[in-house]
Amino acid sequence: MKLVLLTIGLLALAFAGIAIKIWAKKDGKFAGTCASQSPFLNKSGEACGFCGKMPDEQECRDPKVQQN
């Protein structure tokens, strides 16, 4: 029972941390969420499949993504 309560408490703490991060960020946006930004996920330097951004670019190419 202790393990279940500890697990629920840690999950609640994690969700609260994410909620605080979204609340504190301007417009609730996370920075660098494209997979193209991660050298572990994008070893070949391909563009992001969602917005088309290359690893060396800072902003998404798709204007619809920038507005969200």
Image (cartoon, rainbow, N blue to C red):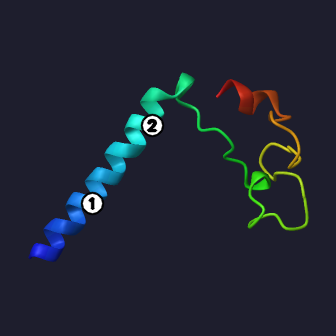
| Numbered circle sitting on residue 10 | 1
Query: From the viewer's perspective, is residue 24 above or below residue 33?
Result: above
Q: Quadrant of the C terminus?
A: top right
Place of residue 54 in the rendered image (x, y in percent of width and height, measured from the top left): 89, 47
Place of residue 21 in the rendered image (x, y in percent of width and height, measured from the top left): 45, 37
Q: Crowding at label 2, few (<14), some or many (≥20) Cα neighbours within 10 Å?
A: some
Place of residue 45 in the rendered image (x, y in percent of width and height, measured from the top left): 90, 60
Helix, strand or loop at label 1? It is helix
* Three-letter code, disc 2: Lys
* Three-letter code, disc 1: Leu
Q: Which residue is at 86% across, 45% downward?
A: 52
Q: Which residue is at 43% across, 29% downward?
A: 23
Query: From the viewer's perspective, is residue 31 above or below residue 4?
Result: above
Place of residue 18 in the rendered image (x, y in percent of width and height, measured from the top left): 42, 44
Query: From the viewer's perspective, is residue 47 above or below residue 62?
Result: below
Q: Which residue is at 88% across, 52% downward?
A: 47
Q: Quadrant of the N terminus?
A: bottom left
Instruction: Classify residue 9 by image quadrant.
Output: bottom left
| Numbered circle sitting on residue 24 | none
Nearest to N terminus: mark 1 or mark 2? 1
Q: Crowding at label 1, few (<14), some or many (≥20) Cα neighbours within 10 Å?
A: few
Horizontal side of 41 relative to 13 (left or right) equals right
Horizontal side of 56 relative to 22 (left or right) equals right
Determine which residue is flagged by label 2: 21
- Count of marks placed on residues: 2
Distance, label 1 to label 2, CA atoms, is 17 Å
Instruction: Classify residue 60 by image quadrant.
Output: top right
Query: From the viewer's perspective, is residue 15 above or below residue 6?
Result: above
Asked whether the beta carbons under mark 1 and mark 2 sit within 8 Å of each other, the answer is: no
Horizontal side of 14 relative to 64 (left or right) equals left
Helix, strand or loop at label 2? It is helix
